[in-house]
Image: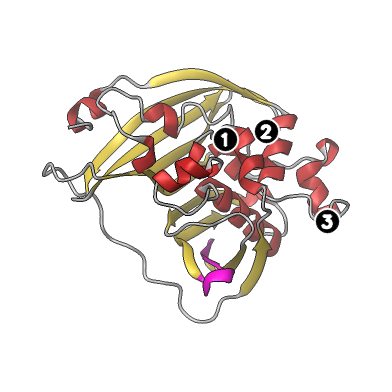
Amino acid sequence: MPIDAAKALAAEPRTGEITWDHKDVLLYHLGIGAGRPATDPDELRYTLESRLHVLPSFATVAGNGSPGVISGLSMPGVEVDLARVLHGGQTLALHRPIPARGTATATGRIAAVYDKGKAAVLVMRTEVADADGPLWTNDAQIFVRGEGGWGGDRGPSDRPAPPAGEPDRTVERPVREDQALLYRLSGDWNPLHADPDFAKRAGFERPILHGLCTYGITLKAVVDTLLGGDATRVRGYSTRFAGTVFPGETLRIRMWREDGRVRVTVGAADRDDAPVLTDTVVQHS
């Protein structure tokens, strides 16, 4: 069996130093569509180093995302075909605002392995801390198609009820044709997002947008629309990736205010609002 759950869970964590500076933050912000219009004062806080605010989802790529999903797929007990891998969900906990430049220690491990029958799910946890203490914790839920069925723990199955009533705000965000090519420069080199032949082998008609790019686009929309543009108010952010986005499409983002959090759904406006992100929650102060 390509996935040995016991071996994967028992593997020693991988620890390494990561660094980033304003150039990495600026590139990430451009990769999720910031800077349109280029001279808008609200956009300059994402694109001009003298006014720079760090969107918390930058945590998913800081230090080129290492240790990240691709690194985790080479952990002991895990040997899978990258074409069978899909990013199922992401959870981010912020311990304090992310600085525009920093050096930190990232510790990555497989925190859980679930048997979903037709797929295995790996929960890859990355904890990051600098000299002042913890910065953030990232959990990536990775589906590996065709690798389940060994009789293991199926994992949690509870899902929140959909948001009730009409959304408080709805916005649309166009995705550039070259968005995936720009976003991948922040460290996710999976050829699924750039190579048409690889995308077809994985079952897609053409390269798809990174789920974490949609994740970043969505958080920026929430911060800009309901949090007064103040990225430091974000305390946590979780989502389930429910469908694909193709570069060139438009995202329709619906938001519901709740006490201390915003519930969000995202659909592909060009495909009758086909679900893209569900079970999405932004926790805030």
Q: Is residue 272 magenta?
A: yes
Q: Is residue 102 visible?
A: yes
Q: Amino acid at mark 2?
A: Pro
Does label 2 or label 3 sit earlier along the sequence? 3
Magenta-colored span: 260-273
Q: Nearer the viewer, mark 1 or mark 2?
A: 1
Answer yes or no: do the residues labelled 2 and 3 have beta carbons within 8 Å? no
In this view, the residue farthest toward the bottom is 165
Quarter occupied by the N terminus? top left
Q: Amino acid at mark 3?
A: Pro
Residue at the image point whose x is 53% and y is 61% from the top: 261
> Mark 3 to mark 1: distance in Å?
24 Å
Residue ID for mark 2: 99
Residue at the image point whose x is 63% and y is 51% from the top: 233
- The picture places residue 60, in percent across and down from the top left corner, at 54, 38
Q: Amino acid at mark 1?
A: Val
Residue at the image point whose x is 39% and y is 51% from the top: 203
Under circle 2, the secondary element is loop
Q: Is residue 255 visible?
A: no
Residue ID for mark 3: 37
As drawn, 209 above or below 7: below
Under circle 1, the secondary element is loop
Does label 3 or label 1 sit earlier along the sequence? 3
- The picture places residue 172, in percent across and down from the top left corner, at 66, 67
